[in-house]
Image (cartoon, helix red, strand yellow):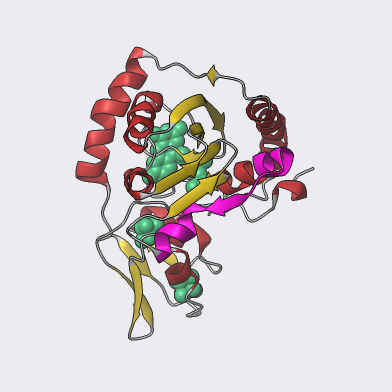
Amino acid sequence: MILYFSGTGNSRFIAEGIAQKAKDKLLSLTLLMKSSQDGVLLESDKPFVFVLPIYAWRVPRPVDEFIKKCTFKGSNEVYVIVDCGGTPGNALKYIKNSCKNIGLKLKGFDAINMPANYIMLYPTTVASNPNVQKALKIQKDKVESIADDIIQGKEFFRRPASFKGKLQSAIGNFFFYKTLISTKKFHVNDKCIKCTTCVARCPLNNITFIDGAPQWSNNCMHCTSCINGCPVEAIEYGDKTEMRNRYYLKQSYDDIV
Ligand SMILES: Cc1cc2nc3c(=O)[nH]c(=O)nc-3n(C[C@H](O)[C@H](O)[C@H](O)COP(=O)(O)O)c2cc1C
Ligand code: SF4
Ligand code: SF4
């Protein structure tokens, strides 16, 4: 069973590739999290495979917490594949702890570099940009090779953390949750067509429609799904995002050739 969480499509893309090659079931944790806060029963005879984005050099905290609430039946093995814009830091250390917590044996870990999506922090590129398309095509080779390793039941632990990575995952991650995550700067402009896509996509159900416009509560993980995924780019975060391109990967794994 291939389980993925994805804010802007990168992890979904990788998970699709692995599921296709491994002929295994594909399940969206993003949707599961939306529909249940209490965890769910997950059953698979083959090893579980998680595909997750990196947020502040670890897997996103709400996703980690949701996984810990789930019950796993069948296989007691798990692979964790993360994707990131630059480096996963020392995410593996924390993933190992979480796997112990849920009673699964971690058999493999790897990280795939994908286009960075944190538009609130830095400029991002549109997914249709030829350089992005080229990069995605190149990363498909890595996806296929990881899928082969999983099919063969290999053990692999790649992308060891540097000293800097260890600090980033420990201290950087702490400050990310303490100081960076806020919804105060989200606002919507008059381009909004009231399609409610942002409401439907938010994995934490943090957006509601009040008086015909989206409003943000405080339960946010900065996944960027709302701001990057709005079809008319009506959502801004402060004033810095006004000049920035939106990154949202809609293409399926087979669309990139
Ligand atoms: C809140 C947030 C924090 C991020 N932190 C990191 C990071 O620490 N290291 C990194 O290389 N990329 C980081 N990124 C980039 C994402 O990991 C990367 O773009 C990922 O592929 C997004 O996956 P998705 O499209 O499935 O959501 C961050 C993105 C967001 C939104
Ligand atoms: S996704 Fe964009 S256009 Fe649609 S309701 Fe939300 S802000 Fe408005
Ligand atoms: S409000 Fe937007 S950024 Fe925050 S969790 Fe929901 S979709 Fe993600």
Q: Residue 217: where, in percent of width, then height?
A: 26, 66
- Residue 125 is left or right of residue 58, and the answer is right
Residue at the outermost bottom position: 211
Q: Residue 211: where, in percent of width, then height?
A: 33, 86
Which residues lie in the magenta part? 17-35
Q: How many marks?
A: 0
User: As displayed, is residue 152 above or below residue 121?
Assistant: above
Camera-side residue of 59 and 75: 75
Q: Main secondary structure of the magenta part?
A: helix
Residue at the outermost right position: 257
Residue 150 visible in the current orientation: yes
Whether residue 238 appears in magenta in the rendering, the answer is no
Camera-side residue of 251 and 3: 3
Q: Residue 227: where, in percent of width, then height?
A: 44, 60
In the rendered image, the quadrant that contains the C terminus is top right
Residue 116 visible in the current orientation: no
- Residue at screen point 63% across, 49% down: 25
In the rendered image, the quadrant that contains the N terminus is top right
Residue at the outermost front position: 74
Q: Residue 61: where, in percent of width, then height?
A: 32, 43
- Residue at screen point 32% across, 35% down: 101
- Residue at screen point 38% across, 85% down: 212
Camera-side residue of 234 and 226: 226
Residue at the outermost left position: 178
